[in-house]
């Protein structure tokens, strides 16, 4: 379960409001690009601190994924139109399957 889901579950279960305030402030700061006073993390219990660290890790990972997506989008717009037309749907699907580890083929069993 990712950190955002954990925080939502903590809110729904009515966990300690003081602890939750820090997690909510951190989540809001990350989402809105605001500053956050890290010293607040010293005031929360280890269980909540671990969730805060997980939230930071998830945010960083998502940020990198977003950056890679934007780079890919930019690269695709810079490719000459004739090159874009040359890329078939089958090639795109095969590339996606290869990247996901699917390999694109079905395994055949012996009869």
Image (spheres, rainbow, N blue to C red):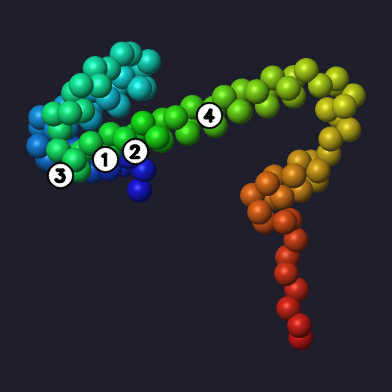
What is the number of the mark on residue 50? 1
- Regarding residue 71, the answer to whether it shows in the image is yes
| Cβ atoms at labels 2 and 1 below 8 Å apart | yes
Vertical placement of residue 82 versus 46, above or below = above
Element at label 1: helix
What is the number of the mark on residue 13? 3
Which one is earlier in the sequence, the residue at label 3 or at label 1?
A: 3
Vertical placement of residue 36 versus 24, above or below = above
Outermost residue toward the top in this view: 34
Which one is earlier in the sequence, the residue at label 4 or at label 1?
A: 1
The residue that label 2 is drawn on is: 54
- How far apart in space, not on screen, are marks 4 and 1 (Cα)? 21 Å
Q: Position of residue 61 (x, y in %)?
A: 47, 34
Element at label 3: helix
**Quadrant of residue 107 in the image?**
bottom right
The residue that label 4 is drawn on is: 64
What is the number of the mark on residue 105? none
Q: Position of residue 33 (x, y in %)?
A: 37, 15
């Amino acid at each position: 379960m990712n950190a955002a889901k954990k925080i939502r579950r903590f809110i729904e279960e009515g966990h300690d409001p003081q602890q939750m305030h820090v997690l909510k402030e951190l989540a809001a700061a990350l989402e809105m690009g605001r500053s956050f006073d890290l010293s607040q993390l010293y005031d929360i219990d280890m269980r909540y601190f671990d969730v805060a660290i997980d939230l930071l890790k998830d945010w960083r990972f998502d940020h990198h994924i977003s950056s890679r997506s934007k780079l890919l989008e930019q690269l695709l717009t810079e490719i000459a139109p004739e090159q874009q037309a040359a890329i078939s749907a089958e090639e795109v699907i095969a590339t996606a399957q290869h990247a996901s580890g699917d390999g694109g083929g079905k395994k055949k069993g012996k009869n």
